[in-house]
Image (cartoon, grey):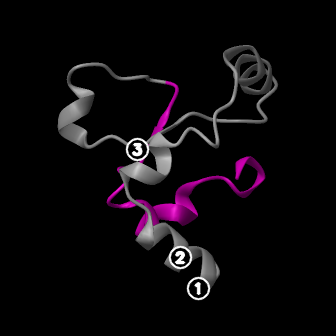
Amino acid sequence: MSKELENVLKEMNLDFFAKGEFKMSLPAFKEGFLKGEVLLLDVREKEELSFLSFPFALNISLRELPEKYSEIPDEKV
């Protein structure tokens, strides 16, 4: 991962995600997911997953994302 991207990820907070600038429609997500082109990245903490989890999602907490970014398949970034 580039240092620039790493720095951006480290500076992100929940406000960044709450803006909704990176939303994808459900039909577009479903189509891409079924084709194997996209994945659902669940950025909630492990404790939050006990309430509802998505077995098909990749879970990397927002706090861990800068360190674990390499776990996201390159073709799905």
Give the magenta range. Answer: 56-77
Q: How many marks?
A: 3
The tag on residue 3 is: 1
Q: x and y percent of residue 29 in the render?
A: 71, 24
| Distance in Å between CA atoms under marks 2 and 3 | 16 Å
- Callout 1 amino acid: Lys
Amino acid at pointer 2: Glu
Q: Nearer the viewer, residue 47 or 9?
A: 9
Are discs 2 and 1 less than 8 Å apart at CB? yes
Rendered image quadrant of residue 21: top right
First-in-chain label (2 vs 3): 2
- Quarter of the figure that contains the N terminus: bottom right
Q: Which mark is residue 6?
A: 2
Q: Position of residue 45 (x, y in %)?
A: 26, 43
Give the Cα distance between marks 3 and 1: 21 Å
Q: Classify residue 56 as left or right of residue 52.
A: right
Question: In what element is the residue under mark 1?
Answer: helix
Task: Identify the residue under disc 3.
Answer: 43
**Per the image, is 61 magenta?**
yes
Does 52 sit above or below residue 14? above
At mark 3, the secondary structure is loop
For label 1, count other residues whose C-alpha is less than 10 Å away and answer few (under 14), some (14-19) or many (20+). Answer: few
**Residue depicted at x 77% and y 51%:** 75
What amino acid type is highlighted by mark number 3?
Val
- Residue at the image point whose x is 52% and y is 25% from the top: 56
